[in-house]
Amino acid sequence: MKKNIETTTGYSNGQIFSLTFLRVLIGWHLLYEGLVKLYTPGWTAKGYLLGSAGPLSPLLKGMAQSKSILYIVDIMNEWGLVLIGLCLFIGLLSKPCKILAMILISFYYLAYPPFASLGFNAHVEGSYWIVNKNLIEIAALFVLYQFPSSHITGIDKYFKNN
Amino acid sequence: MRKNGFRVFRKGIKTQKHQYKIGMNKNRRDFLQGMAAIPFLGYFAFAFKDNITKEIRGKSIDYLKTLKIENLKATEKKLLPPTGSNSNIIRIGLVGNGWRGEQLLYSLGYAHPEIVEQNTVNGKYTKQFQSFLDQEDLCVEFAGVCDTFEIHARRGFEISQNDICPGGCKGKTKPVKIFPTYREMIASNEIDAIVIATPDHTHAQIAINAAKAGKHVYLEKPMTHSIEEAIELRNTIKSTGVIFQLGHENRQQMSFKMAQEMYQKGVLGTVTMVQTFTNKNSPDGAWIRTRKFDHLGNPNTINWKEFLANAPWHDFDLKRYFNWQRYSEYGTSVTGNDFSHKYDCVNQVLGLGIPETVVALGGQYYYKNHGDMPDVINAIFSYPERGLTMTYDCTLLSGIYRQSHILSSEATMDIDNAIMMYKDDNSERYKDINSGSDNPMYYYAPSADVDAVSSATSKAYLKGGYGPTFIDGKVIDATFLHLKEWIDAIRGFGKTSCNIDAGFEEAVTFNLANLAYTHKKPVKWDKVNEKAIIG
């Protein structure tokens, strides 16, 4: 068996398990974040965008000030997180999902970049400098992008030959 | 051979069967591998809803439920739509065009050309100035100005000539008439209402004479220099029926309106202690101020006799003229200058009225060469009928910021333009609220855009509740709202919120403290005879 998988996928059992586990964890996280936003009555990214700092701040603040743009941002945030999360979770359309997830999380990272001069560290539970959990999640997604697992342990498996 | 051959055949079949079995297992396993995450998803789908409900409940606390009230109407209040038009323009005369006079003109829609210049960067207006231009046109005409300092009056004229103002300045650039004194101004039939921003000792005489002449009055705080003047002014305003507004613009601040409603709805329970503060630590904060054209002041440009008015005679003195706040002959001490604001804020929340007894102690220890204003003073105001005491702590040599505190049996409320409420550990009303006494159980902050403001003094000014406020979904300057309320009331729409009764309470309360400080004795208020009893 072990030999079989190794020959067909190039991964060992342990590698397959760890890559799948990481994919499911990130999927779980994004799905839950999205669902919480979806279920919170009147949820909007307005306050988050208005409070942003760093290089993207003028753009993000501008987004919050336009009603129509804010509406789109809200919908994309809620459903983007839910769908990307769900897809990563079950291993469906894994490749594009990982790219989208990296882009989405990059926005969160750049909206509140962990630079000491911006003074956000006072409000978070740990201490971060340049590297924070968002950046690590982006890096983890990049690893998953390089070492996909959904064609073995995901729904993508059933489409791989089509 | 045949036997052997059969064996081989059977073995072959067995091997095939075995291999087929292995193949089946392999395919099934392989197939199931693609579903590896599904059991986790199953658990997620089964449990997430319950968890999300808890999560959302934890994040979005219903403040009405927390405070145990059904609604908070103050925040739903709408702004009164514009009441002015070309047919009902109110002609305003300004008495006293010093720094505050110019601020009031600005809120009325008239800016000095200097302000336009300062707020034009690369041919574009600053955000702050643009919001001034976008403010409602109150449809008033700046028709008259007078000042004891020639330069101030001339600046009034320059302001009237500026054609950049809200509403496009249609017909507004008429040159303002400069009156020699307020007496000629109130006698004029070209003036409908007057705004008074003069030294405190002249407030009463100008306001009384104006009201007697039928002019509506907007009077800068504090109301009067003495209790006797407050009584006379109140009686005059009531008998003439003119529209009166005292310049405590924090009456417009949303936080105080909300706090008043919350108090009336029992949110605080029994209030036993009210603490108010002044903390400043600069000569400017101690009212030792200079402006760039003060050096132009001399006996030829200053009407010294008119400035002194009813005050005891003193030889011409520029220091007295420009820093009059620091001299008790003209000013009303830190109590009239700053406590009056703090008092008016808590008075509108709690409806305190006039205290029964006041004691005050302190002294002038530091800024000794500038009049007789104390730099350190503590005053206690006793309200036995209300079962509470109000205190006032002031130092002009410490800049620490302290909001007013309202201490009660259920919670403590820290209030300025924001509200922070802390649950009392032994509260009965909030015993089920999961919040310690070190974390606010309720918090309100207006979303005011303070980008344009950077100095510490300006921030203290904003925090104190004198800057912008949040109403009807908009951030609006409190002074503008306060003037608008007065102008709308003159046109018959609504009433002024800092009316003569509120002003009377303010004037009597801080003047009682001044008497207690001067005489170093407790001072009682005889409410039947409306008299202060010293000792």
Image: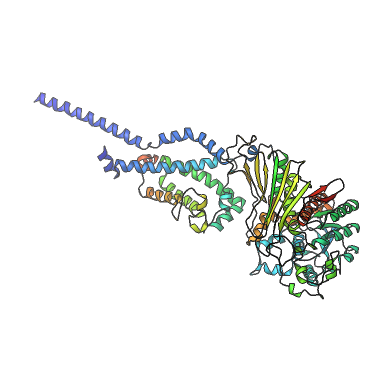
User: Looking at the image, is B399 positioned above or below residue B408?
Assistant: below
Residue at horizontal 38 percent and vertical 40 percent from the top: A154
Number of labels in the image equals: 0
Location of residue B118 (image quadrant) = bottom right
Q: Is residue B217 left or right of residue A112?
A: right
Farthest top residue in view: B3
Residue at horizontal 74 percent and vertical 74 percent from the top: B295
Q: Quadrant of the C terminus of chain A?
A: top left
Give coordinates of residue B189: x percent, y percent.
91, 63
Q: Nearer the viewer, residue B18 or A50?
A: A50
Q: How is the image coloured?
A: rainbow
Location of residue B75 (image quadrant) = top right
Residue A1 seen: yes
Farthest left residue in view: B1
Q: Quadrant of the N terminus of chain A?
A: top left
User: Looking at the image, is B310 positioned above or below residue A139?
Assistant: below
Give coordinates of residue B417: x percent, y percent.
67, 51
Residue B252 seen: no
Q: Nearer the viewer, residue B194 or B122?
A: B194
Q: Nearer the viewer, residue A111 or B16?
A: A111
